[in-house]
Image: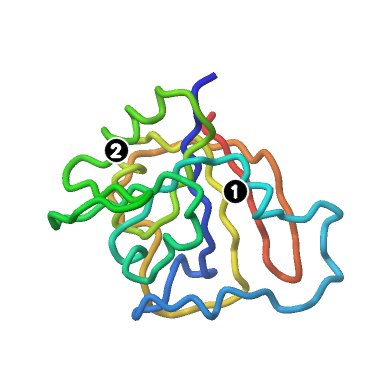
Amino acid sequence: MERKIILNLAISIDGYIASEDGGFDWIVGDGDDKLDTENKWDYDEFLKGVDVVVMGKNCYDQNFYNEFSDKKVYVATSQELQDHDNIQFINGDICKVIEEERKKDGKDIFLFGGGGLVDNFIKNDIIDEYIIGIIPTILGKGRPLFLGNNPKIDLHLDQYIMDKGVVILRYSKR
């Protein structure tokens, strides 16, 4: 079975994945559990199902790669940087590299973010699953998930989870 490319991230109600300075301290629920579903989101369980993580240079610079020391991490960058440990820097067509990676045996591929990186995958329509946590916050400004001029991509809602005000939606392509 072919490995899936899975986008998994949180967005504000108005579509931002980070504040202007890259901050994410706003990614919390409202604490109200009255509408919670029986199912809960288990990030650790999700991580057990992936062995490759793809991120942009901004995420790398914020040291997010430290969370994935047991996985192969690809970092998209316009710079010529030296690979180290489990980190591979990709200066070029990141989608092509990940499409090749997808053909190899292994677990799923976690498309971690940011928006510039994700935009390439959306425009190439190669994301198999979208897991979006909607945070009950309007940021007003920041780093958007969708950069515009995208192809039309029809999705199917496979699962929804409500956890203390955060709605987690899991979609697959249809």
Image coordinates of residue 90 in percent, x first then y, are: 23, 46
Q: Which residue is painted at 29% across and 53% down in the image?
A: 84
- Pointer 2: what residue? 95
Residue matched to label 1: 47
Whichever of callouts 2 and 1 sits on the residue coming sooner in the sequence is 1
Q: Position of residue 119 (x, y in %)?
A: 32, 50
Is disc 2 surrounded by few (<14), some (14 to 19) or many (20+) residues within 10 Å? many
Residue 6: x and y in percent read: 50, 42
At 34% from the left edge and 80% from the top edge, which residue is drawn?
21
- Which structural element holds mark 1? helix
Q: Quadrant of residue 172?
A: top right
Q: Nearer the viewer, mark 2 or mark 1?
A: 1
Amino acid residing under circle 1: Leu
Q: Residues within 10 Å of mark 1 (few under 14, many from 20)?
A: some
Horizontally, residue 68 falls left or right of residue 137, namely: left
Q: Nearer the viewer, residue 33 or 60?
A: 60
